[in-house]
Image: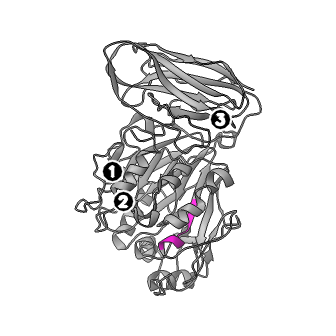
Amino acid sequence: MKPRHIATSVVAFVAFASTVGAADLKIWSVWANESSGTGTLIQGPDGTTVLYDLGGGATWANYCKEVMDANSVSTIQYTVAGHYDNDHIGSLDNLVDLTGGNSATGYSPNVGTVKFYDRGGSVGQDGEDISASYLDFVTATGRRATAKVDGTTDISLGSGATLRFLSAGAADTTNTLYVRGKANSTVSSENDLSITALVTYGGFDFYVGSDAEGVNEKAIDDVVATGLGRHVDILHVDHHGSDTNGISSPEFLGNMDPEVALISVWSNSFGHPRATTVTNLQAVVEPLPQRIIRLSPGDTAHPDWAPETMSYCHTTNGHVTIMTNGSTYTVSGNGITEPGLVNHAVDDGPEPTATPTPRGPTPTPGSPTWPVKLHVNSTTFSRTDSISVSADFQTCLTPFFPYARLIDPFGRLIYLQRAPASSTRLSWTSPARFIESGPWVLNYDLDYFPVLDISFINAAEGTWAIQGAFLDIYGNIIGGMNEKLLTVQ
């Protein structure tokens, strides 16, 4: 099986003081019923609203207005044109007119009342003029602004929630890509000049990157974790699930390490979303149902298209809503029924000053308690040692996944997998730490089955916990927990 990453949805290790009593951050990915165009509507806890990418025409604008009306969003304060292809800027004039403005004069009482962010210029990378319906309007407003990656144009969304620009291309035909906290890169396409961003709130992180391709992705793939110290919860897949020019590579996705992936796609003739992209996503998202969500089936006639039956996939044929209080998030939309997507724990949090007592999920009341007994080669380790863990599993005729995880001294989930593990020794810096197999049905007891074999080199000193359990096919704990405390010194 391919490596997998699953982050538990049944326990939150950290409470975020900055979000206590605050409103939710809300994100809507707009579906346009097979019409072209992509766009993400983001509303912060204080009501500040950003439209990131601006759809592909009148039909998309109507559906975006539908989302706004259904959620009492009357004003959009900021827009971000990820890049200048029409499916990313083609609806702005229509949306302005739908909301009581006049796109011909630059009058916009309800859309873009503060700033219109893009990368500047008057032509695209190929030298072609930017669509006049977009360029004339944003110029006429006097509120066109250039997105910068030095933090000066980051957008505050209230209660600590922020939209941070990660990369942005230079204006016109210049092939320079500006990257947050790093040297500039050189790209060669309109897509790779896309503006990328990270939306954060408490411990929650949402990545959106318009049509960024492989060079852009490679330039930012360590900015989130290394530069900003964050971990992506939900990733908006670049370029509608394409796999051309190195998009959504295993390296990029491994560094971003999302739990859920969202693909904005419609009926098209490009093979989007590609099977290669979905396969790469399968290696990093939680290995559970509905963790790779697409708005539409996409190009079903293309030989490289990703079938909807691929593991973890779900098609909504409708809008997708994400809501978070900074500690947990919920993903909802047409046909999304997986319980693990309700109040899912975020993947980030500040490091507490005191060592917490490691905690884990408990079985559902009244469920069978099939014990999982863990064996470790030691309980005290140095930072040059390795840990080998095996487990005993009792007979279980209900389909299940064996489950093991490590929790570091700060209470953070560091290593989570479903047994059996490969015998390959893995380090903390390895991008392939997560391994899945199953589901299983056992009609006999299984003793001393290898579960983990990893190195503690560079691991944090302090008290660790290792836990084991049985998960059902929906990711719920159905078997008895077994926990052991370990010391790294």
Vertically, is 480 above or below 104? above
Give the magenta range: 191-197
Decide if residue 114 is in sight here: no
Vertically, is 61 above or below 237? below
Amino acid type, residue under disc 1 in the picture: Thr
What residue is drawn where x is 31% and y is 57%? Answer: 296
Of pointers 3 and 1, the one earlier in the residue sequence: 3
Q: Which mark is residue 316?
A: 1
User: Which one is in front, 441 or 81?
Assistant: 441
Q: CA distance from mark 1 to mark 2?
A: 9 Å
Left or right, 238 with respect to 180, comes to left
Q: Which mark is residue 15?
A: 3
Q: Coloured how?
A: one colour
Decide if residue 125 is in sight here: yes
Instruction: Tell me the quadrant of the picture where the N terminus can be found.
Output: top left
Secondary structure, mark 1, is loop
Cβ atoms under marks 1 and 2 closer than 8 Å: yes
- Rendering coords of residue 294 (x, y %): 36, 53
Amino acid type, residue under disc 3 in the picture: Ala
Left or right, 474 with respect to 428, comes to left
Cβ atoms under marks 2 and 3 closer than 8 Å: no
Q: CA distance from mark 2 to mark 3?
A: 33 Å
Q: Quadrant of residue 119?
A: bottom right
Amino acid type, residue under disc 2 in the picture: Trp
- Rendering coords of residue 45 (x, y %): 60, 51
Secondary structure, mark 3, is loop
What residue is drawn where x is 42% and y is 30%? Answer: 475
Instruction: Tell me the quadrant of the picture where the C terminus can be found.
Output: top right
- Judged from this view, the residue extending furthest toward the left is 301
Please rate how many residues cluster around mark 2, counting C-alpha atoms within 10 Å: few if below 14, some from 14 to 19, many from 20.
many
Q: What residue is shown with label 2?
A: 31
